[in-house]
Amino acid sequence: MQKESRVKYLIVIILGGFLCLNAQNPIVANKGLNDPHIHIFNDTAYVYASHDKSIQNDKFIMNDWWIWSSPDLVNWKKRSVLKPEDTYIGKPFSRCWATDAAYRNNKYYWYFSEGNAQTGVVVGDTPTGPWKDVLKKPLLPSGLTDTHEYDMAVFEDNGEHYIIFGVWEYYIARLNRDMVSLAETPQKIEIKNPRGPYNLDGTNKLKPTDDKPFVHKYNGNYYLSWGCFYAMSNNLYGPYTYKDSVIKTNSFAEGYDEPTWPTGFKQGRHGSFFEWYNQWYFIYCDISQTGNRYFRDSFISYVHYKANGEIETIRVDGQGVANYNAKQPKIEAEDFFKAEGFKKIEFGTNFAVKTTANKSYFNYPNVKNLKNKKRISLNVMATTGSTFKIEIRKDHLNGTILGENHFTLKPQRTSKNITIKLSKLSNKENIFVLIEQLDQKNLAIDNFSFLN
């Protein structure tokens, strides 16, 4: 690792205690947590991940696999370690590559890559094990297809589970109900006009995509992604049409765009998409804070979908998710942690939330720096007009009322600010915004600010 990168890393460690007060990316700093897949089990987020050994790494050294969990995407705890000695590999191994997990039959299944060669699976009674290698051999052995059988993702659709894997070209196969055998011969996935970190202009036919495929589904569309690149289809098996990268030059907050990988900031963004409490997220690898491509961090960003199904460019910053700073000029309403009775809408060059029920709510936990803040200003609009009641509560839906306002909006095409006086604020609060409307269901909230 270069000297300047080493110095930067030491500074991050020294300042870590201060940075964590207002920053949540990386989700687990200075640990080498990477290749992350998050699943929500029992109302808890579990990240199944690989583990870069050391900041001193000058190549990929990954001696085990990890599980961390969080109740809120902010506070993380290490829960489980899977060693290669406890799998069919049977001995220490330094290429413990990407993993994924699934739940079925009251069991949890943790799939793991044996380097870039094969895929195995262990089974447990809880999301964190203990784990047993029931096959005692690979689930996806080397030579099964024309690609390499590693970097898998497991996707559930209509009660069936599928495994997707490979590099440059991807294959998919339905799993049997036992989750440790294939129900069919793997089929190649066609991607039209693909791009990737080694194929930014579409001319590299040998390396058109990347490794680490992932599949998720939103609003009837299937999304096949590899790092920050993605394609869409209306059929799980494809064909898929390449769309875009979710990370662009304008994604980055200051201090998060460098250093990066040899081919640029779009390389090495292994990760996964997931949904929790009606919010979508992308968790992915980053090296901007370690300065070493062989010692990676994991970041989480909000995901917002356009009306045509395509994914809006994400933000890459230290603020992270489910974490808010009252000193910010504004907090985007669509960046909630929990919400019901709404839909996200495109609003100018950004997004907003629009109510779809007579009663709606939005939750913003971990709002910091509220000292001396006495008001909240919400930027709102109602195209057909209506009478509304907004309550600001703390901790839960029936929590203490911090402030409220009843108001009527005339039909309007431009937004206006509604201000609510607040009381009994601590420096850090778990804020709930409750909205009630008797007739129309059309209040759009673009953003809000805390005022002195």
Image (cartoon, grey):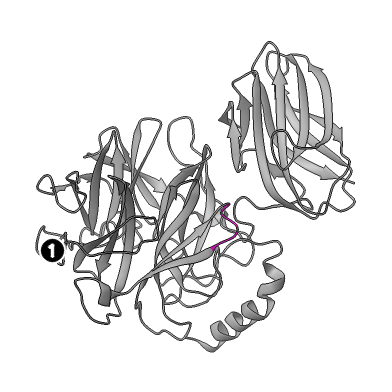
Which region is colored magenta? 72-76
Is 228 or 282 nearer to us in this picture?
282
Q: Is residue 75 a member of the stretch shown in magenta? A: yes
State the image coordinates of residue 323 (x, y, percent, origin top left). 66, 53
Looking at this view, name the residue that lies furthest to the bottom. Answer: 3
- The quadrant holding residue 448 is top right
Specify whether residue 392 is painted magenta: no
Label 1 packing within 10 angstroms: few (<14), some (14-19), many (20+): some
Q: Position of residue 297 (x, y in %)?
A: 49, 68
Mark 1 = which residue?
Answer: 141
Instruction: Decide: is 378 above or below 139.
Output: above
Position of 276 relative to 403 (above/below)? below
Figure check: 83 above or below 433: below
Q: In terms of depth relative to the viewer, which is nearer, 360 or 318?
A: 360
Majority SS type along the magenta span? loop
Point 30% across, 41% down: residue: 156
Q: Position of residue 160 (x, y in %)?
A: 24, 39
Q: Is residue 347 left or right of residue 306?
A: right
Q: Amino acid at mark 1?
A: Pro
- Which residue reaches farthest top? 439
